[in-house]
Image (cartoon, rainbow, N blue to C red):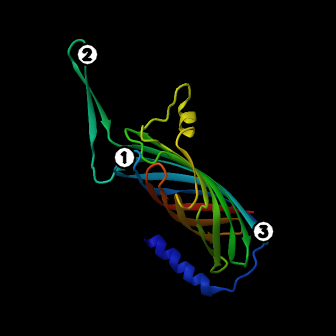
Amino acid sequence: MKTIKFLSIMLLLGCFALPSRAQSPQTSFKVQAGVSPFWVYDQAASPLVYRTNIFQAGLQFRRDGEKHSWDAALQGGYGSSKALGTGFREIRFVHQDIHETNNVVHVTLGGSLLQGRAHLGWAYRLSPRFSLGLEAADELYYAQGFVTPGLMNLAYLGPRAEYAIVANEKHQLRARVAVPALAFINRLGHHGSVSIPESGQVAGFFSQNFSVNTLNTFQRASLELDYKWRLSQRLSLGIDWSAFFMHHKDLSTLRAAKQSAMVSVTFHH
């Protein structure tokens, strides 16, 4: 909450601090690290809501020209998952050997989630502060463990809008919203398996339960706030906050939400 309040104050200051100015061409490279709580309800896998605290890191490249801007990013993360409200539970499998000795194997009712994202964006600057453009991204959520809610791959394309605010020479805040218009989605089926005969797990997963979606079956609304504190001509420190809500109703209902808070170091050229 403190981070959100701080960014809100910077947004208000930037609206009244300085008149907008044209931005000279600039290239930047950003390194990020932080934590991202992720909630998912996947009716195809479980009737429970699962939460994962994803420890995440990322790299981002950005090029701002006189009228056009381009950016590309890679992010990855890993964390443990558990169902909300169930506490610590486990299943015990008992096996008796030939000597009538019982061997017990304990399996925790939880798991882990591996997450990755690749992103490519372009925007056209309509004013010194406001830009409109397109965003293409691919997201992979690979759940592992006794249950597999949220196992999916999303590739999507859609419009985005960006508003840049310069409060003074040292502080900058950029806000971005995006909503995909077209998405290609793979999800886990009701059978709970990614394997098919004479095929590996990866090929099996991507060959099953594939769907092409528009806004009537898939919605993903996102908001990003990117704050930078300019330490020198070459270096900035920052805080990146983002959140999205996602809904997919093809196959079985899936709802997911994610919030990210990350610290960043940006190198300017």
Q: Residue at x 61, y 84 (%)?
A: 15
Kindly identify the amino acid type of the residue bearing the numbered disc 3.
Gly
> Mark 2 or mark 3: which comes first in sequence?
3
Between residues 208 and 231, which one lies in front from this camera angle?
208
Give the image location of residue 212, x and y in percent: 59, 51
Which residue has dot 1 on it?
46
Kindly identify the amino acid type of the residue bearing the numbered disc 1.
Ser
Q: Secondary structure at mark 1?
A: loop
Give the image location of residue 69, x and y in percent: 73, 66
Q: Residue at x 43, y 53 (%)?
A: 253
- Tell me if mark 2 has few (under 14), some (14-19) or many (20+) residues whose alpha carbon lies within 10 angstroms of its own: few
Q: Nearer the viewer, mark 1 or mark 3?
A: 1
Q: Nearer the viewer, mark 2 or mark 1?
A: 1
Q: Nearer the viewer, mark 2 or mark 3?
A: 2
Q: Residue at x 43, y 71 (%)?
A: 1
Between residues 51 and 151, which one lies in front from this camera angle?
151
Residue 45 found in image quarter: top left
- Tell me if mark 1 has few (under 14), some (14-19) or many (20+) residues whose alpha carbon lies within 10 angstroms of its own: some
Which residue has dot 3 on it?
65
